Amino acid sequence: MKDLRNNSTILAIDDNPTNLKLLHRLLSAKGYSHVHLLTDSREALSTYKMLRPDLILLDINMPYMDGFEVMDALFSLQEPLMAPIIVISAQQGSETTLTALEKGARDYITKPFEKNELLLRVQNLLDAHLAHKLLNDQAQVLENMVELRTKELNDTRLSVVQRLGMAAEYKDEETGYHILRMSHLCQLLAQKMGLPPKDCELILHASPMHDIGKIGIPDSILLKPGALDAHEWEVMKTHAQIGGQLLGDDDSDLMIMARNIALTHHEKWDGSGYPNGLQQESIPVEGRIAAVADVFDALTSQRPYKQAWSIQEAIQYITSHSGTHFDPQVVDVFIAHIDDAILIKNQFQDE
């Protein structure tokens, strides 16, 4: 601690140059090599910002700004690690001492002072301040390490989500471009509905998992070129529950949203959807957004078992099912920004 203490920066403020020279001589003889002297108290704030000292020695009776005003200016910065202040003044009496301590001074020494007493008080306050700085630095290092580890974990989760989404594509007839179009449209709708930026980014990365449960559907049903019979359709509908189970109990924001979308993007506003017959706002907003985005892209995309609908036909279908299949608010936002939706569709065309 001694080496750190001697390398500390000390700022002495006093309008009397003789007093400053005395302080400088005493401190230098004790090994303090970074002592800065200031006679004009009006420069105290700018000098403090420039030097960021570890200790301030401050007189009270000064022209322009007295010591109390200097303390008010310094503490207005509201810094978490403000340098401790030792007031050195010829003023005696408990009222002045109490005022100085109330304004934030850590110690009060009256002139004339005993040099060893001054040096010991300087040493003690520097030791305490440097210890606080070390603890703060360690806390900052730990915080940075936690942030880095959290980012690495989130990046890993995102990579898992993306790769599982790709696995679902290999199993289904839909293409990777459907995933891109659908996820970007989800993000667009979320943004235009005023969702927080974090949620808009999450829905972009989570929505590609909407059909991950199709991994658990037999190929004979999933890839059947014709219409499904009643039993096959019941099996097909289980992909929503399978998706929720595959995404598990991870409590990260990304996986929670991915699970919500997988489970609820086939729920309907009027409660007639699956797997749980949720209705209206009991369906998570990300599920309601994904429902519109998924249906729009599915209708306007060509598949081996169907031709692509026109944009106008898809719009008519979605608007006619507003309030039954789809959340009316999501539909209104979708229609209001249909040009942006078409741009996304054109940007990620199937090869």
Image: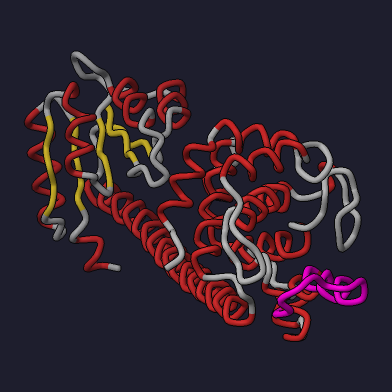
Work out whether residue 163 or residue 309 is closer to the camera in this orientation and state it: 309
Picture quadrant where residue 233 is located: bottom right
**What x and y, as percent, mark residue 286?**
68, 51
- Residue 57: image x %, image y %? 25, 38
Write down the region rendered in magenta.
Answer: 223-240
Across and down, in percent, residue 125 comes to 35, 51
Locate the C terminus by quadrant.
Answer: bottom left
- Residue at position x 83%, y 72% in the image: 228
Q: Is 350 left, or right, of 49 in this rendering?
A: right
The percent position of residue 301, horizontal first and vertical second, equals 57, 59
Q: In front: 282, or 165?
A: 165
Residue 335 falls in which quadrant of the image? top right
Is residue 212 depicted above or below 297 in this figure?
A: below
- Residue 57 as seen in the image, left or right of residue 141: left
Q: Nearer the viewer, residue 34 or 242?
A: 242
Locate residue 42 relative to residue 180 in the image: left or right.
left
| Residue 182 in magenta stretch | no
Q: Quadrant of the N terminus?
A: bottom left
Residue found at the far top of this picture: 64
Residue closer to the observer: 324 or 143:
324
Q: Residue at x 16, y 26 (%)?
A: 43
**Considering only vertical position in the picture, is 34 above or below 58?**
below
Is 235 in the magenta? yes
Q: Residue at x 29, y 25 (%)?
A: 70
Say how many tags the image has.
Answer: 0
